[in-house]
Structure formats: C-alpha cells, structure tokens
Image: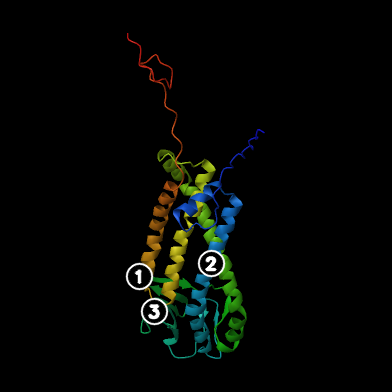
C-alpha cells in the first residue's frame, strides 16, 4: 500500500515584534510596525520621563515655594507693577541647593545664595539668577498678584496638585511634539544611510525608525534629571548630560539603521564574453 505524502505548509514570514526600543534591534523593529504602535510606545515613554520631571518639581522646588509663602507677611500685593513690601529687605524666604526665593527690594545683591536657581523679588521686577547670568522680568502693570501669607497659603495648597498634573501633561505634549519634529528632520538622512548601507528600510520605515531611536536618548536625559534630584549629579553635569543626550540619540539612530536586515544581492549575470548559457559548466567554445 502506497503512502501519500502529506503536503507541507508554506512557511509564513516572521514579523518582528516592536515594543521596547531600548536596543538598536528593538528600535529597528519599528520599521515594520504601525504608526499607532509607535505613538503608543512613545506616549508610554513620554509619560515615564514626564513623571520624573514632575517628581523633581514636587521634591525640589515646590516645598521651597510652600516654605517661602509661609514666611510672607500678613499684608502685601504686587499691584500696578510694584511690590508692596513692609518687612525688612533683603529677606531670605526659602532655600535649598536647587532653588532659593528672596525679597530684595533694591536688588542690592546682599542676599545671594549658592542655589542653582535664585528668584529675587524686587520693587518693580523679578530677577532670576543662575549660572547663565541674570534676567529681569518686570511685573505686569495691569495685574494684581497676592504676596502675603494669609491669602497665598490656601491658594497654593489648592493649586499645587493641579499644577503638578498640568506639568506632567505639558511634559508629555512637549516630548511627543519634539520627537515628531526630530523624526521628520532625521527622516531623509535615515533613509539615505539605510540605502547606502544596503538595509531593508522603506520611506515610511525610515520615519518610524527615526522616531523609535529618539526614545533611548529621552530616557538618558530623564535618568540625568533623576540623579540630579537625588543629589548625585550637580547642575554642570546635568547640563553636560543634556548636551550628550543629543549625541547619544545620533549614535543610537546609526546603530538602529545598521540593525536592519541586509537586502539580498542581485543574481549573478552571465559572462558576456562566453557563449555558454548561464549556469552551464561546459568550457567556452574556442574562437
């Protein structure tokens, strides 16, 4: 009895799973993913990085703002572009290594602190001091701002949590918009590099690969902010990390392009100087 051979199933092409772009291979898989998947993954990374920035605000800046408000006098406003201040000047309201808030009506410079950022309230303007220098911001003449403890303490207590939520949402929007713009900026260069390196990379895949390769650089910057907030990095090293994260993004993008599969070579053409058919092992005919 003859046995019949079972038909073999046709193998299906394996489609890489694009989800975690923290390695060049993982980011390269997004060349074949959908835009929806890319944007969802970018949204998750943007949320994580924004939460780190919000944590920094909540632990480094906001407590000093609360302390400073509690040290304000019982009366005081900023009205008509001028600060109404009845206490002695200069006066330090709150300070840590990240930020300090000072009232120095005449900006005499006698209340300078070693904080990375100092906000100084003067008679007619707000003076912001950092390693980049100083910047004076005049008070708007058409608005009235609270500048006393009894009114600002409950106001800040009610608005501080919503402000942190808004900061998180703003961080997500800024990151997503910047990744979109940078991916568009790197789009052509990504495709050209893939073309000359003989990589399997379409026009649409080049844009998605560029967008996926930006996320590790964002994680690098988020980690630097976390280390700065923990006191492991100082301000200068944080700024250096901010410059390096751009270079990290470029290097990672190049590694991602090279992680794409190579295109198969073209079939060998017949030797034009022989009369034999392609693939024949016979020696060429004598002239």
Residue 271 got which mark?
none
The Cα atoms of the two marked residues, 1 and 2, are separated by 24 Å
Residue 241 on image: x %, y %: 38, 65
* Mark before the other along the chain sequence, 1 or 2: 2
- Front in this rendered view, residue 45 or 168: 45
Instruction: Give SS at disc 1.
Output: helix
Tell me if residue 139 can be seen: no
Q: Nearer the viewer, mark 3 or mark 2?
A: 2
Instruction: Give SS at disc 3.
Output: loop
Instruction: Give SS at disc 2.
Output: helix
Residue 123 on image: x %, y %: 46, 80
Would residue 90 be found to the left or right of residue 50 on screen?
left
The answer to whether marks 3 and 2 mark residues whose Cβ atoms lie closer than 8 Å is no
Residue beneath disc 2 = 48
Residue shown at 40%/41% (left/top)? 197
Residue shown at 35%/69% (left/top)? 237
Q: Nearer the viewer, mark 1 or mark 2?
A: 2
Residue 279 on image: x %, y %: 43, 22
Location of the C terminus by quadrant is top left
Residue beneath disc 3 = 115
Residue shown at 46%/42% (left/top)? 191
Residue beneath disc 1 = 236
- Front in this rendered view, residue 33 or 144: 33
* Mark before the other along the chain sequence, 3 or 1: 3
Location of the N terminus by quadrant is top right
Q: Residue furthest right?
A: 1
* Mark before the other along the chain sequence, 3 or 2: 2
Residue 12 sits in which quadrant? top right
How crowded pointer 1 is (Cα within 10 Å; few <14, some 14-19, many 20+) is rated as few
The Cα atoms of the two marked residues, 3 and 1, are separated by 13 Å
Residue 39 sits in which quadrant? bottom right
């Amino acid at each position: 009895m003859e046995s019949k051979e079972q038909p073999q199933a046709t193998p299906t092409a394996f489609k890489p799973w694009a989800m975690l772009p923290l390695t060049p291979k993982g980011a390269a898989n997004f060349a074949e993913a959908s835009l929806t998947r890319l944007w969802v993954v970018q949204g998750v990374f943007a949320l994580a990085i924004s939460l780190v920035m919000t944590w920094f605000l909540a632990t480094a800046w906001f407590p000093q703002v609360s302390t400073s408000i509690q040290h304000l006098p019982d009366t005081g406003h900023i009205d008509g572009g001028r600060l109404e201040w009845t206490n002695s000047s200069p006066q330090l309201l709150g300070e840590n290594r990240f930020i300090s808030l000072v009232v120095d009506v005449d900006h005499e410079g006698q209340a300078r602190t070693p904080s990375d950022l100092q906000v100084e309230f003067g008679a007619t303007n707000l003076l912001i001091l950092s390693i980049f220098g100083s910047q004076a911001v005049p008070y708007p003449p058409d608005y009235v701002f609270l500048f006393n403890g009894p009114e600002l303490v409950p106001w800040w207590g009610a608005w501080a949590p919503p402000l942190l939520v808004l900061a998180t949402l703003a961080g997500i929007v800024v990151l997503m918009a910047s990744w979109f713009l940078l991916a568009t900026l790197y789009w052509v260069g990504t495709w050209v590099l893939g073309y000359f390196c003989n990589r399997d990379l379409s026009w649409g895949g080049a844009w998605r690969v560029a967008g996926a390769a930006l996320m590790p650089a964002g994680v690098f910057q988020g980690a630097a902010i976390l280390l700065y907030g923990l006191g492991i990095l100082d301000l200068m090293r944080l700024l250096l990390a901010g410059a390096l994260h751009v270079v990290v993004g470029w290097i990672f993008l190049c590694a991602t392009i090279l992680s794409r599969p190579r295109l198969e070579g073209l079939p060998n053409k017949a030797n034009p100087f022989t009369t034999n058919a392609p693939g024949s092992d016979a020696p060429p005919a004598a002239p």
